[in-house]
Image (spheres, rainbow, N blue to C red):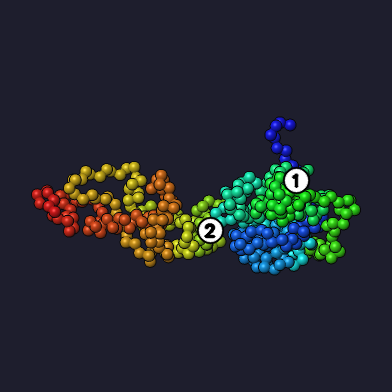
Amino acid sequence: MPAGRRVRRPSVAIEHADLEPLTRSDLQFDLLSHIFADETKVFSDPASGPDKLSFRDVFINAILRSPKAKSVLKEKLALSAFATDFGKLALLVGVGRLPATMSFFAEMRTAQRTYHPIPSLQRTNGNLLDSPRIKAILKSSTLEGDSAKNGLATPAQVLARIKAGQIPPTTLPNLIFVFASHSAEIGKDHLLDMEFLDLFLPNPASSASRARVFLWLCYHYHEGSSAGPGEDADVARGNPFSDPSSPGKAPSLVMLTPDEIALENLDPADEKALAARLIAQREAIVQGHLLKESVKESKKAESTAGETPSPVKPKRQRANAKAGPSSTPLERKGPEPVKEELPEPDEIYLKKLQLDDDDDLDLSAPQLVRPAYREERRSPKREPMPPLSPLRPFSVGVALPKPYSHRYSPYKRPRTMLQHAWHVVATSDPLADSDEDDEDEHVRQDHADRLAVISRVRGKAPTPEPEGVRPIPLHLGHWHDDIFVA
């Protein structure tokens, strides 16, 4: 094996199928019970000042202060029994025993999770969240100034902060993440023939001795008062979980015989019955959900039965179909529909409008007259305009459009100038030709309004000036000997 290459240990996560309960042996329930039942108040809590608390209280308080913990969870954690059960589950999530695919409340319906009842931890309430949410709560549990990204990540960093005088150097949930991420390093420094994560696996060592070793490690890296090798035993007692016979070291593990191992983590009969009831509850929820989905699918199938898919129509045909049969004045009632021919371009015309935000069009009202300048600009035979004097106002060779009146508009809700400007910016192509035939009534009306403004400013219709007549700008000045005097 190449030097310096780290051997990756197999996953410690529990692998169970959906609805398979987690037994006490899976959880190493006796180990968790010894850890959370220890009442030795030697751990510092930033929120409690100089007072020392037990491991359980400090761990639960860190969860309560997590920004990811919802108010509903905080209210439930106020119950002592539920807080202890949730703390045990959170500790297993922190060390990686419970994978991210597990959920622990029967109502969850996502296909990304599998439901697993935990009878030993669901005594007060059946809902215990799921692994990803619990892990997010633990990850966000940091000291003030730290975060999940820039917090302490190695045992060396934790000890360096303790040496600098900061106690505690981090929160207990984050410290457990550090232990799990450096399991081999922790085992090499403090344990003999095992890693840190081996403490939470089925093990020939007793649950009580493994719990003592775990608490010793937490105190050593959370409080930093353990004695080093060769120091006096009295100093070593600074860590209340030390063994006086081995100062500065983790307590020794007590090995059990196979018969003694069989007596640990036994599932009582009431928890087996609870597991069966939780499984039945989950199956009822799943079956009810499937029944609702099948009813929806059957109703959808019945509503679509007998319907033939209609071919896709062009945009203008869809617009006419949406406007309704009464909006097509070209059709007359009779045995055979008679199609009228469109009038000449310069006469009154009907155009199929694009329905954007006006669904209540009234096409039976008189339509707008097509402006003459449209045909003149498109006509290739129009004669060029005569040159104009630079001193004369510019004359537009177009016919004056009729004044706009909402009464004769096919739109019952005319757009304001701001609405039309926004519509043009949002829907028009700046590179498209402005003379295209598919412009809607709003665009043509905008052109008509602009020409009306020009005619009012000039005081006359925008027609070519007669020969020999000089236009006099209103309120601007007068002409004198072919010179405009302001």
The mark found on residue 321 in the picture is 2
Q: Position of residue 210 (x, y in %)?
A: 78, 52
The mark found on residue 250 in the picture is none
Residue type at the position of mark 2? Ala
Q: Residue furthest top?
A: 2
> Where does the N terminus fall, quadrant-wise?
top right
Q: Determine which residue is flagged by label 1.
A: 191
Please, is residue 376 above or below residue 336 in the view? above
Q: Position of residue 180 (x, y in %)?
A: 70, 48
5 or 340: nearer the eye? Answer: 5
Q: Is residue 108 visible?
A: no
Task: Measure the alpha-carbon separation of dots 1 and 2.
Answer: 81 Å
Q: Residue furthest left?
A: 481
Q: Position of residue 226 (x, y in %)?
A: 68, 51
Q: Position of residue 434 (x, y in %)?
A: 38, 48
Residue type at the position of mark 1? Leu
* Residue under the image location 25 percent in, 59 percent down: 456
> Where does the C terminus fall, quadrant-wise?
bottom left
* Contact check, label 1 and label 2, Cβ < 8 Å: no
- Snapshot quadrant of residue 127: bottom right
